[in-house]
Image (cartoon, grey):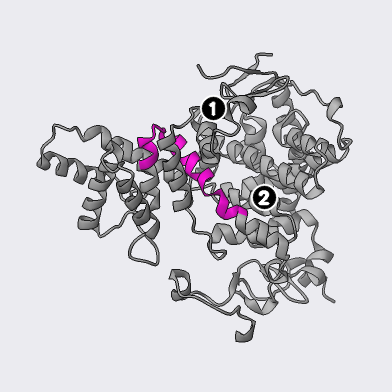
Amino acid sequence: MKPIITRVAHAGHGDHQYFGHSALADLLGVETSTGLLALAITGRRPTTEEREVLDALCVSLTAADPRIWPLKLCRMVASYGEALAGFAAGQLAMMGHGMSPRIMSDAAAHLKRLRRQLDESLGPADVERILRDHVAASPRLAGYGIPMRAQDERFEALRGFMIRAGRSGLPHWRAQEALSECLRRDRRLAPNIGIGHAAALLDLGCSPAEAGALSTLLIEHTFAANAFEAAQQCEPLMQRLPDGCVQYVGPSRRASPRAAVSRP
Amino acid sequence: MSASDQAPGRRSGPLDDASWPEKLTARVVAPGPTPTIHGYDVEGDLARHYSFAETVLLALTGDVPTTEQGRAFEVALHFLSPSPINEAPTHAAVVARICNVLTSAIIGTAAIALAEQARVAVFEHSGWIRRLESEELGPVDEWAPGSDDERRSVQRLRETLHARGIALPALDHDVGRLAALIATLRFAGLTHPDQLEAVLVMARLPCALAEALATPPHSFRDYPIDLPPVRYAPPP
């Protein structure tokens, strides 16, 4: 049987190897938690500056209102007293077309394509043409559009951080800024946190798939907070709402064909 | 809930300022003291006149099946039910049991893995599902049996259905086991990939759980940890 090759880890005597590093000798006391997450996905340890970006990305995803759909289902499952069950269910809520990581990966993929076309030597007219073609090629670009508000406060805060951190001139962030300006102007679409994360993670050297996976990990604290609190509360209303809270719109009460035949 | 039930200090925000429905919308089960499924009384009607499998079909399709559809569904469920330990869903559930986790965690593990297995299986048969919809099967080489064992299994399916008075034209072709079972489920009324995924999970969950629950908890040293073998190759 051919062995499965892993680059992740090996349990040794006295220490554990993790992506080529000794977990206890090399990482303990040195690596940050978000740095470990980046290492888990990319296989590469971030620099000190990159760790700060990862921390900022993590904080920028701190939208943990228990009513937000994936967090609410997380709480419902955790309401029976097991935080891990709620946490696990919350993870599944991100597995699809509606939530990250796919959206983050899609955003990173199209931004990477755009960046490849935006050569430094291009004049403004060529840049404008490339941006318009990019927008025209996709009816709906991942990372744009914001429900229920005019702008995504998470994106704007991240944008401020990137400027302060001196990373707003990096290639993918610049491509994002140009694309965002184009979409604001032509489609009245504002950038959301997805395109901000995509740009920042691409500039950290992530692939689109890695950007999606890493963004998902960086949002876990919002699930953890809700799962833990819900498990502590064991709130009966989370477990069951009164029947009066349900509006039934299915077929009216009816007799089955077999019941109809069996009637005297 | 009255206004007095609301927590104090309600704040303003996008979620607070938007308008939302006040009730959950139920489309299948009408809750209450005598619940119905798609309008049929569960306790006073379905429990008396329909098998559980037929009630599952009702839930998934929206109406009670014919006798033939119910029989075909029962046969398909039987054929689908084995979930052997060497396949990931049962294997994972067994490992969960070895880890001595809560039973709910074993059930959750098995269900997630079965759902993933079903998702991929149905996706791999999406072309076959479209062919069944068109009712012009054409060449079926893509879904041919992978082995003589599989071909014999499909023959047993044909014979079992035939014994119950059911003949499916799709099974006149030399198709693989899952393709044949999907055709059978389609005859039973399950036409959408979502419905097929749901049924694959439901059919296999009992055996996956049974295998796990038959495993001694905490039996770490009885488990072949290096099967399949895994070797560490750190990044350069």
Q: Residue at x 71, y 69 (%)?
A: A240
Q: Is residue A223 magenta?
A: yes
* Front residue of B164 and A91: A91
- Under mark 1, the amino acid is Glu
Q: Residue at x 69, y 25 (%)?
A: B151
Q: Position of residue A201 (x, y in %)?
A: 40, 39
| Vertical order, B208 against A180 (above or below) | above
Say which label, 1 or 2, has the lower sequence index.
1
Instruction: Compute the Cα span from label 1 to label 2.
Output: 24 Å
Q: Residue at x 50, y 35 (%)?
A: A38
Q: Are marks 1 and 2 on the same chain?
A: yes
Magenta-colored span = A200-224
Q: Position of residue B80 (x, y in %)?
A: 73, 39
Instruction: State left or right for residue A137 relative to residue A90.
Output: left
Instruction: State left or right for residue A180 relative to residue B123.
Output: left
* Front residue of A174 and B55: A174
Instruction: State left or right for residue A102 relative to residue A165.
Output: right
What's the mark number on residue A2? Answer: none
Residue count near mark 1 (Cα–Cα under 10 Å), binned few <14, some 14–19, many ≥20: few
Q: Main secondary structure of the magenta part?
A: helix
Residue count near mark 2 (Cα–Cα under 10 Å), binned few <14, some 14–19, many ≥20: many
* Front residue of B219 and A8: A8
From where the camera sits, is residue A249 visible? no
Q: Name the quadrant of the N terminus of chain B.
A: bottom right
What's the mark number on residue B188? Answer: 2
Tag 1's secondary structure? Answer: helix
Q: Position of residue B157 (x, y in %)?
A: 74, 35
